[in-house]
Image (spheres, rainbow, N blue to C red):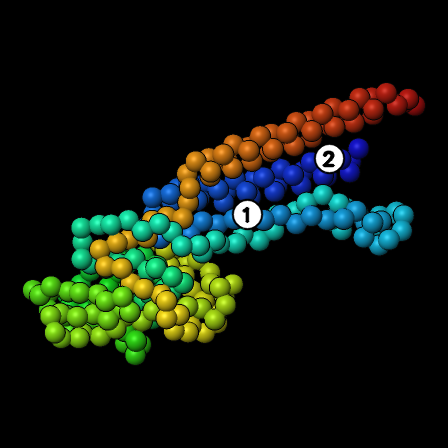
């Protein structure tokens, strides 16, 4: 009976973690270039099955026999749909690349291509005001705010016949090295390499969120019902245990 309570409790924990992840995805369904997260779960073999022989569980239930437990949260970096805008300062990245930006102290990766010019006529992210780096690793500046700006597919920035520089497009050494920093920024524990040749910059476009609201709502409803079923199982087992204890003879 206690073992059943334990397994149902595990189910509640897993579905609670899943709801948190799906709810955060839904909250970012309209956030440009947002990449949805996926909650995973770890299945555990019963103790005797894992050891290949029937045996009593040693110690207590901390050994996690059977059932499931919440696993790591992973990010789906699939390409999001591109939507056309009216701003020449909007960029979408088609492919696996990221923009390389800095706050002056730390470097970040982002796919949010809403850009602007700061007071020093440097290219910066519109939301954070972080400097966009050029291919040499420095800030991309020297832009005339009174002249039209053109972004070529390879990230080259031009004003008329004058080449201002080229945006640094990079990819992490391993996609698993990326960690979300918040506000569409990522940090990487490994090295950043130049993006593949097929990575392209699309001027006048933005990458939409990778969240599909209808699918996420279905996931949230499914998770809520599964959590409720586990809670009901806990209640049922608790009531059965109470009745069993009350039926025992008392001295």
Q: Residues within 10 Å of mark 1 (few under 14, many from 20)?
A: some
Residue 3 figure quarter: top right
| Image coordinates for residue 248, horizontal then vertical, percent | 88, 23
* Sequence-wise first label, 2 or 1: 2
| Rendered-image quadrant of the C terminus | top right
Q: Does residue 162 appear to the left or right of 214 in the view shown?
A: left
Q: Is residue 221 above or below residue 157?
A: above
Q: Secondary structure at mark 1?
A: strand
How many numbered marks have been drawn onto this rendered protein structure? 2
| Image coordinates for residue 155, horizontal then vertical, percent | 27, 68
Q: Does residue 213 appear to the left or right of 206 in the view shown?
A: right
Q: Is residue 45 visible?
A: yes
| Image coordinates for residue 15, horizontal then vertical, percent | 58, 39
Q: Residues within 10 Å of mark 2 (few under 14, many from 20)?
A: some
| Image coordinates for residue 59, horizontal then vertical, percent | 82, 50
Mark 2 in CB contact with mark 1 (< 8 angstroms)? no
Q: Give the residue displayed 35% in from the left and 49% down from the top.
A: 81
Alpha carbon distance from label 2 to label 1: 23 Å
Of the numbered discs in the image, which one, if any, rests on residue 5? 2
Q: Is residue 231 above or below residue 140?
A: above
Residue 197 figure quarter: bottom left
Q: Give the residue displayed 90% in from the left and 48% down from the top.
A: 54
Q: Does residue 99 appear to the left or right of 24 in the view shown?
A: left
Q: Is residue 129 visible?
A: no
Q: Secondary structure at mark 2?
A: helix
Of the numbered discs in the image, which one, if any, rests on residue 39? 1
Q: Nearer the viewer, residue 203 or 99?
A: 203
| Rendered-image quadrant of the N terminus | top right
Q: Does residue 162 appear to the left or right of 76 in the view shown?
A: left
């Amino acid at each position: 009976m206690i073992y059943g309570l334990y397994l149902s409790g595990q189910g509640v924990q897993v579905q609670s973690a899943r709801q948190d992840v799906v709810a955060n995805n839904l909250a970012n369904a309209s956030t440009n270039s947002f990449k949805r997260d996926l909650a995973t779960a770890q299945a555990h073999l019963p103790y005797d099955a894992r050891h290949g022989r029937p045996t009593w569980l040693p110690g207590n239930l901390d050994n996690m026999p059977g059932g499931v437990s919440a696993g790591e949260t992973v990010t789906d970096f699939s390409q999001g749909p591109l939507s056309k805008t009216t701003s020449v300062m909007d960029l979408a990245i088609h492919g696996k690349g990221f923009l390389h930006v800095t706050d002056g102290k730390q470097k970040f990766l982002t796919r949010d291509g809403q850009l602007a010019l700061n007071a020093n006529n440097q290219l910066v992210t519109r939301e954070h005001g972080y400097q966009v780096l050029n291919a040499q690793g420095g800030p991309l500046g020297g832009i005339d705010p009174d002249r039209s700006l053109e972004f070529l597919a390879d990230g080259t920035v031009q004003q008329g016949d004058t080449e201002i520089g080229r945006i640094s497009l990079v990819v992490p050494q391993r996609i698993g090295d990326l960690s979300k920093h918040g506000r569409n920024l990522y940090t990487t524990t490994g090295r950043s390499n130049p993006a593949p040749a097929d990575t392209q910059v699309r001027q006048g476009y933005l990458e939409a969120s990778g969240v599909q609201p209808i699918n996420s709502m279905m996931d949230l409803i499914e998770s809520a019902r599964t959590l409720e079923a586990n809670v009901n199982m806990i209640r049922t087992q608790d009531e059965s245990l109470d009745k069993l204890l009350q039926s025992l003879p008392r001295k």
